[in-house]
Image (spheres, helix red, strand yellow):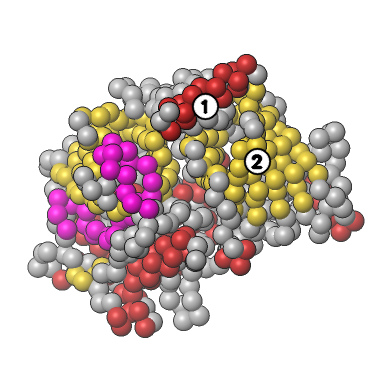
Amino acid sequence: MKRSTLHSLLAAASFALAASYGVTSSAQDPAHPDLSGIWTLTKPINAAKTEDGKTPPLTAAAKAVYDKNLALGKKGNRSFDGVSECLPPGMPYAQLLNKPFQVLQKPDALYFLYQENRVPRWVYINQPHPPSDEIDPTFMGDASAKWEGDTLVADIVGLNDKTVLDRSGLPHSADMKLTERLSVKDGILTDRITITDPANYTAPWTTVATYKRVPASFRIPEEVCATKVIQTHLDVNGKLAGTAVKRAPAKTASAAPAAAATVKK
Amino acid sequence: MQDPRKLGRLALGLGLGAAVLGMSTSALAQRDVGRNLYNGPDHTLEITAPSGDTGPAPAGSKPPNLDVKDFNGHWVNFGIKHLAGPAAGVPAPLRPKYLKLLEKRMRDTNSGIPEGDASTQCFPHGTPRAIESPYPVEVIMTPAAHGQPAQVTILMETLHNIRRLYLTDKHNAKMGESFLGESIAHWEGDDLVVHTNKLNTRTYLDDEGTTHSTQESVVEHIHKSPDGKKLIVLSTVTDPVTLYHPYTTRTVLHWRPDIRNQEFICEENNRNGVDEHGITTAK
């Protein structure tokens, strides 16, 4: 039997098996369940909870930080949340935003394209992390995943500490590691994310989010957060249009905005 | 073996390091001399452009896919083309009012007080300027599913721009104006033909400041070279308000399977920092 025929038969068998459990396979990756589509939370999440609905097991020091963030949030002060300054949400916050995201699926990667300020996230499949000393910490981390049956299990490292875990302001350190388990059944995508961060949590804990696909006519709009904070531009007649909105200096700003003007992109 | 992403980043970093050499006093500056790309006689309109580029994929990289209708993968524009008109150094066929505006912007840049533009304000670059970026792009082609049309997605490293080219025959009435517009596409033989409109006027057509109106539309013919190593993008720009007639600009993207897009956070300026001498750098 030709190898390609064998693969086709295996893919068909996998499809049949998956279909029998309410799971359909991906057109792009017939051997695996179809995680693609534009998804949105089944219900909004303001604060990440453990699987049994409790506040995560914060250390005393982390609880003090969290209480401060909660108090700020109650006053409408979002200074603890980089999303309010157009920075990427990080993880798991990106998965907990009450805005749609598109998943593109390939055999070697899953792409999450968030409506939120056009933030992308790559989950590489069957590709190991680079050596740890070569990973520069980023907002969205370095994700390496494998299929375990019908579940895609991603290991996420290399997350910087400029983000919070959720809208409520749960803290984390740069040593945090995540394990993300993605599965789909009966049209519902489930993301189970286990957070391991001994500096802030006394034990690993897992939060769960579920998503449904948006109506077929929906297209993700182009969302440009910067238009909310910097609103000057020259119109077609060369006149200054819009209003300069004074922006509080970002805690993480590394250079004067004017510097970028000298670089051609 | 070193991580291929790092190797690609190093090569790109060198190319982009060269991209700021006009202002730099670094060792790289002495190696790489800018070129004046403006073809006209008016020296106040000179464009001093970098000559650095990233080069092809290193030996031993994954060979290109020879299917000319499969654009999946990573691609890099090796050079930044300035004044992305009908030829290098030649402006778009602008009506006089808009040509004067372009010249003002070029003189402002040459006098050291450039206008802030879309990219410096962390806005997407517009079309066709976005595809001219020297940062990598990743193309992902996906079939129609769940009521959504088949899609050619261009993930741009620069400014995390995302272009979605929908393989449909109609623009969507619900989509409003945006920085990158709405793109619909179809195949004509081996060419992917992309029609883009609904572009807002907060962007320029090129780095120098060629303006456009909301009546701008762009038709791109994208095809892959038979050896799989190049994506050639011919962008025909039409704008009855600003242009005497449509013109076509050409961009060549090169196959670079050894790199991955990296995180680009314009909002905290993580890629264009200022060094201890006050010189802008790129990485």
Image quadrant for the C terminus of chain A? bottom left
| Residue found at x 32% / y 44% | B65
Q: Quadrant of residue B48?
A: bottom left
Q: Amino acid at mark 1?
A: Leu
Name above or below for residue A28 compared with residue A165: above
Q: Which residues are magenta?
A: B62-88
From the image, tell me which residue sits under label 1.
A10
From the image, tell me which residue sits under label 2.
A153
Q: Which secondary structure type mostly characterizes the magenta part of the structure?
A: loop
| Secondary structure under the numbered disc 1 in the rendered image | helix
Label 2 Cα neighbours within 10 Å, binned few <14 / some 14-19 / many ≥20: many
| Residue found at x 38% / y 82% | B26
Label 1 Cα neighbours within 10 Å, binned few <14 / some 14-19 / many ≥20: some
Position of residue A120 measured from the top left corner of the image (x, y, whole percent): 52, 45
Q: Which mark is residue A91?
A: none
Name above or below for residue B166 compared with residue A114: above
Q: Are marks 1 and 2 on the same chain?
A: yes
| Secondary structure under the numbered disc 2 in the rendered image | strand
Q: Is residue B34 left or right of residue B265?
A: left
- In the rendered image, the residue lying farthest to the front is A1
Residue B87 magenta-highlighted: yes
Label 1 to label 2: alpha-carbon separation: 21 Å
Position of residue B261 measured from the top left corner of the image (x, y, whole percent): 46, 53
Residue A184 magenta-highlighted: no
